Image (cartoon, helix red, strand yellow):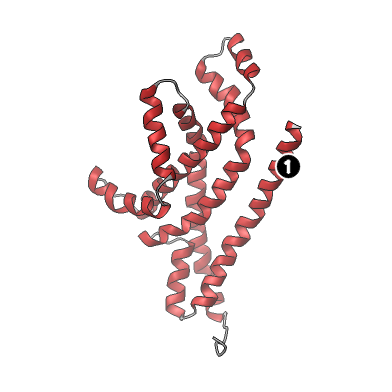
Amino acid sequence: MSDYSFDFYYVLSGFSRLLQGLVVSLELTALAIGIGTFSGFILALATSSPIRVLSIPARLFVEIFRCTPALIQIVWFFYCFPMLANVFWSPFTMAAIALTLNLTAFNSEAYRAAIQAVPAAHRDASVALGLSKWHQAVHVVFPQALRIASPVLVSNSISLFQQSSLVAVVSVEDLMYEGKMLAVETYRPIETFTTVALIYFGLSFPISQLVNRIERRNARLLA
């Protein structure tokens, strides 16, 4: 190791490939967040429902995705789901489905705790106004639960962005995949993977600071 000579020339030459992979990673993350933010709330309502036909399958769904590794979920949807459902979609689509379902499960737990924190007086007021249960959920409970759960939701989104690197194992040409290919082609794994790590860090760290600001703001509002 002491004789190793660092050379970032080839990494910088292939940096455009890393950026192309980053775009794919961001597309996966944005798609999962866009769907998972609202579907997590719907799932939270189902898990909290007194109707066992809804709550039991919903809770089982949450536990399956919370208690199995994200890598297994991605591989399962890529290899097993097409065989069972007789559908053959692109690796990007299968990876997006796996990541979205994973985020939905984790977001539902954040929402479930937030829903319990919504003041009962607000629910009573919505009943007095004659709102249906659906309108109560969408117009009264959801906005407040979203605000309360926002720090956890953002943290989950950061984790999802980092977990998106796992899709490289099913040949999705994301940032990690392009980094791996560049490292193999240039024989510069240290420089390449260090650069990839710095890109992930550079995007995740500012958002993590945003989480801290949101938590402090919520603490002031609840004080």
Please state the horizontal and vertical placement of residue 46, each as a whole percent of the image. 44, 27
Q: Residue furthest bottom?
A: 3
Residue at 54% from the left image edge and 76% from the top image edge: 191
Q: Is residue 86 visible?
A: no
Based on the displayed image, in which of its 4 quarters is residue 129 positioned?
top right
Above or below residue 115? Residue 172 is below
- Would you place residue 35 above or below residue 91 in this image? above
Q: Which residue is mark 1?
A: 216
Q: Looking at the image, which residue is at 56% across and 32% down?
A: 113
Amino acid bearing label 1: Arg
x, y percent for residue 55? 41, 27
Helix, strand or loop at label 1? It is helix
Please state if 217 lies on the left or on the right of 120 as rendered. right
Image quadrant of residue 62?
top left
| Quadrant of the image occupied by residue 181 | bottom left
Q: Is residue 93 left or right of residue 109?
A: left
The picture places residue 10, in percent across and down from the top left corner, at: 52, 79
Q: Looking at the image, which residue is at 69% across and 47% down?
A: 212
Left/right of residue 220 with respect to residue 143 in the rendered view: right
